[in-house]
Image (cartoon, rainbow, N blue to C red):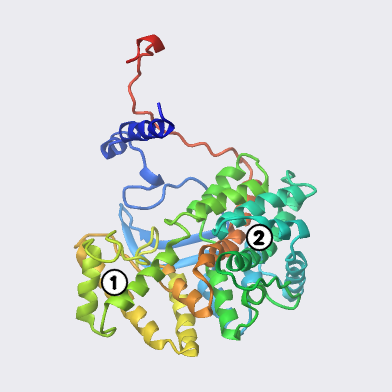
Amino acid sequence: MKKEYVIYKLSESVKTTARIDNELFTLYGVKRGLRNEDGTGVLVGLTKIGNVVGYERIPGGGLEPIPGKLFYRGLDLDDIAHAVMKEHRFGFEEVAYLLLSGNLPDKEELVSFKELINENMPLEQKIKMNILDLEGNNIMNILARSVLEMYTYDTNPDDTSRDNLMRQSIELISKFPTIIAYAYNILRHATFGLSLHIRHPKEELSIAENFLYMLKKKYTDLEARTLDLLLILHAEHGGGNNSTFTVRVTSSTGTDTYSSIAAGIGSLKGPLHGGANIQVVDMFNHLKENIQDWTNVEEIDTYLNRILNKEAYNKSGLIYGIGHAVYTISDPRAVLLKEMARDLAKEKGREEEFNFLELLEERSLECFNKFKGEGAKKVCSNVDFYSGFVYEMIGLPSEIYTPLFAMSRIVGWTAHRIEELNFEGKRIIRPAYKNVLDIQEYVPLSDRV
């Protein structure tokens, strides 16, 4: 039997062996995708790190949609972001300190923390050389392999004491920007034949500034502050998002930090999680080409309805950037990012595109709600609706959109890992699956047809 036919037969068998009727989930009371019937997440843990709020529970049952709120260690993200913007400074390092420790730093603590971050940003020579040698054009894959390699150079990689976990966390937060910037510069050299530039991080710069410097050298103040805001917005999103839950699940086994974080990267890499902003950009570019009058509501609505009816774009029936698992009336991250996106569009002379995107947001929500009909769950635009356009205006290539998400979320991942390994009553996370296959009788090999 040919090898190709063996693979074909095995894959054909999956059509029946992997089939599980949806009715069985209801019959056995199984929460598919760890979701309740009302769409909320199944409560599987407790945390003091982040809180995602999109609705209130009505006494007696039911949910009431409310404007979205995101809290970091009990502090409203809106307050944190607006304070940073008002004071015209960089705030990602402050947020990292807050999420790791549970407290806001004072001025002296923040200065020392920034110095520690900058000291740890340079990569070991062997890691730099190995990034040069790594093949492939997926930066997330290179990032995961580089993280696993850090285990080799850690003198105490398996120690899960508080001190060691914090040291490893700070080193990962520090090194992610450098790994991503170097990996992309090598990719553009190997794939596109462009000059290879390896710029060392500068001690006096913030993480956002250093990343832009290492990636493309020149950048404006508004570009750097907008990237800083994006890093703040993506730093944490509760313990239930897929990649953070992956980190918590693997951490609960007692495995090393690098294995756990690499698993989180693998989760975030998925198009249903971290890759959504790329899909929004692709869709936006498609709409720019196929809608003649960017101000014509009737023309826009007609095309959006064609998308919803699976007649246009990629025929998936999805308007990317619309809808969220928790947020209903608004995604606070999208609201904040929209403010900076408007300013950046003015600086870049792309106000017409911004106005079109803003109108698309309005019409998408209207068309989606009409399409779903009365009684359907209320939806809002999510942070991905504007993030891809912002990355593009900053001059960042699509290959690093999802790695940038990881560069920010590494803060939340490490904070949750530390919590998972340090609360009383901790135990390995081990949910159950109900087997719905009848008992089978074993047939001896000689009797099988």
443 and 158: which is toward the camera: 443
Q: Position of residue 148 (x, y in %)?
A: 66, 49
Badge 1 is on which residue? Answer: 364
Quadrant of res 351: bottom left
Q: Is residue 105 left or right of residue 363?
A: right
Q: Amino acid at mark 2?
A: Leu
Q: Image check: 214 left or right of 377?
A: right
Q: Position of residue 225 (x, y in %)?
A: 58, 80
Q: Picture coordinates of residue 235 (x, y %)?
A: 56, 64
Residue 240 in sight in this render: no
Residue tagged by mark 2?
A: 100
Does residue 444 sit above or below 248 in this rendering? above
Q: Residues within 10 Å of mark 1 (few under 14, many from 20)?
A: many
Q: Residue furthest front?
A: 2
Residue pictured at 49% horizontal, 68% vertical: 398
- Quadrant of res 406: bottom right
Give the Cα distance between marks 1 and 2. Answer: 38 Å
